[in-house]
Amino acid sequence: MARIYIPYGTTEGQTAKIAQYISDVVQAHGHHAETADIKQSGDAIPDGYDAVIVGASVHLGKHEDYVRDFVRANSDVLKRLPSALFSVSLAAHGDTENAESYVENFEAETGWRPAQVGLFGGALLYTQYGFIKRHVMKKIASDKGTLDTDTSRDYVYTEWDGVKRFAEDFLSSL
């Protein structure tokens, strides 16, 4: 039985949901998994884990600074243990080239090259946004030409089957 740590950074909550889903998949396969919001759990990977899966969301074209700092602070552990990254963005829903460039920039900033990377679509949570953010996000979605712009509802672009495959592939590599 492997013990897997799943630290993540999230702004609107979709990355947290994906981290929890990965944890559920890991546990369903008989392993131990623990998720941790990096903002609340501190900047160190606790001892006793066999592998790490880091999650980060993208806003304004880059991953959260505090996730970058977490990865830098834990570089030795991430290079020593089996580790993976999952990146959550709207670009991962139909604009894979941009989603991949976000990860490439993150890798360049941190010096960490995870053995496995998952690119997952995020969510447009219009009903949870304030007035200004709702209209800014609608403009961004409209400019992309492919995303939904009805602000009276939310849209989730995460492909859960892909998240499950990512977790199972990671487990099979251990």
Image: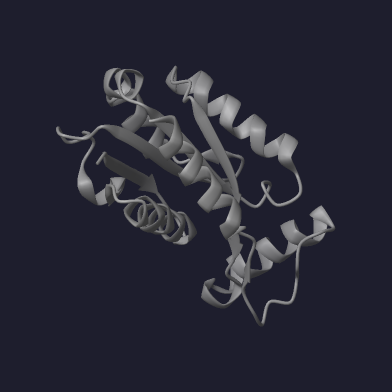
Is residue 122 in view?
no
The structure's colour scheme is one colour
Residue 99 percent location from the top left of the image: 66, 39
User: Can you give x and y, in whole percent of width and height, for residue 74 in the image?
Assistant: 28, 25
Counting from the top left corner in percent of width and height, residue 22 is at 42, 52
Q: Nearer the viewer, residue 58 or 161?
A: 161
Instruction: State which quarter of the image contains the N terminus.
Output: top left
Q: Nearer the viewer, residue 92 or 80?
A: 80
Q: Is residue 126 above or below residue 65?
A: below
Tell me if I can see residue 168 in this picture. Answer: yes
Q: Residue at x 21, y 33 (%)?
A: 44
Quadrant housing the C terminus = top left
Residue extending furthest toward the bottom:
152
- Where is residue 65? Give x, y as percent: 42, 36
Is 72 above or below relative to 29? Answer: above
Residue shown at 28%/47% (left/top)? 31
Name the residue rendered at 37%, 58% in the picture.
Answer: 24
